[in-house]
Image (cartoon, rainbow, N blue to C red):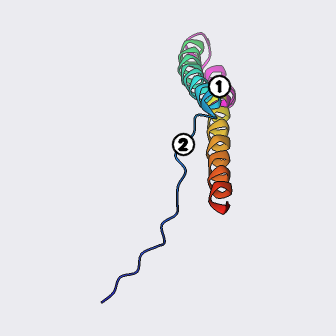
Amino acid sequence: MATTTAPEVARVPATRDYGTLRLWSVVFAVLGFLAVVGTTIGIIVALTQFSEFWQGFLFLVIGAPIALLLATWPIAFSQMMRAIVFTAEDVSAVRHQQR
């Protein structure tokens, strides 16, 4: 029984053209992680400051998710930058292959 394999695509090795974008992607990922950790600590500290249960409960239900959502934007920005690099490298590989 003969096996069929997919044709091999000539891959262009990863270039260093997007090194700066990759670096900033890592920087934003680290900042995002630190922002989420700091926000979580801030939420815990804020919860200890409320005198009534319902104030803390409303803060936990409304304020905390909004704060955590805003703290994660650097992570999303980092992923967007990484996707741009991957897309650009794929386009470059296809252009190189068409020559």
Q: Pointer 2 and pointer 1: residues touching (CB < 8 Å)?
A: no
Q: Residue 2, image x and y in percent?
A: 33, 87
Q: Is residue 23 above or below residue 95?
A: above
Can you tell which of label 2 and label 1 is closer to the viewer?
Answer: 2
Quarter the N terminus occupies: bottom left
| C-alpha span from label 2 to label 1 | 32 Å
Question: Looking at the image, which residue is at 65% across and 28% down?
Answer: 74
Question: Looking at the image, which residue is at 62% across and 13% down?
Answer: 50
Around disc 1, counting alpha carbons within 10 Å, would you say few (fewer than 14), some (14 to 19), or many (20 or more)? many
Q: Residue 8, image x and y in percent?
A: 48, 66
The image quadrant that residue 59 belongs to is top right
**Which of the two residues, 98 or 40, is positioned nearer the viewer here?**
98
Circle on res. 14: 2
Name the element at disc 1.
Answer: helix
Please report whichever mark, 2 or 1, sits nearer to the chain's N-terminal start: 2
Q: Is residue 98 above or below residue 3?
A: above
Is residue 20 visible to the viewer in this orientation of the structure? yes
**Which of the two residues, 84 or 93, is positioned nearer the viewer here?**
93
Q: In the rendered structure, does residue 36 fall within the stretch colored magenta?
A: no
62 lies left or right of 34: right
Residue occupying the far left of the picture: 1
The image quadrant that residue 68 belongs to is top right
How many labels, in total? 2
Quarter the C terminus occupies: bottom right
Q: In the rendered structure, does residue 49 fall within the stretch colored magenta?
A: yes
Residue occupying the far front of the picture: 99
Q: Is residue 47 above or below residue 71?
A: above
Question: Looking at the image, which residue is at 64% across and 41% down?
Answer: 85
Q: Which residues are magenta?
A: 47-73
**Which of the two residues, 53 or 77, is positioned nearer the viewer here?**
77
Residue occupying the far bottom of the picture: 1
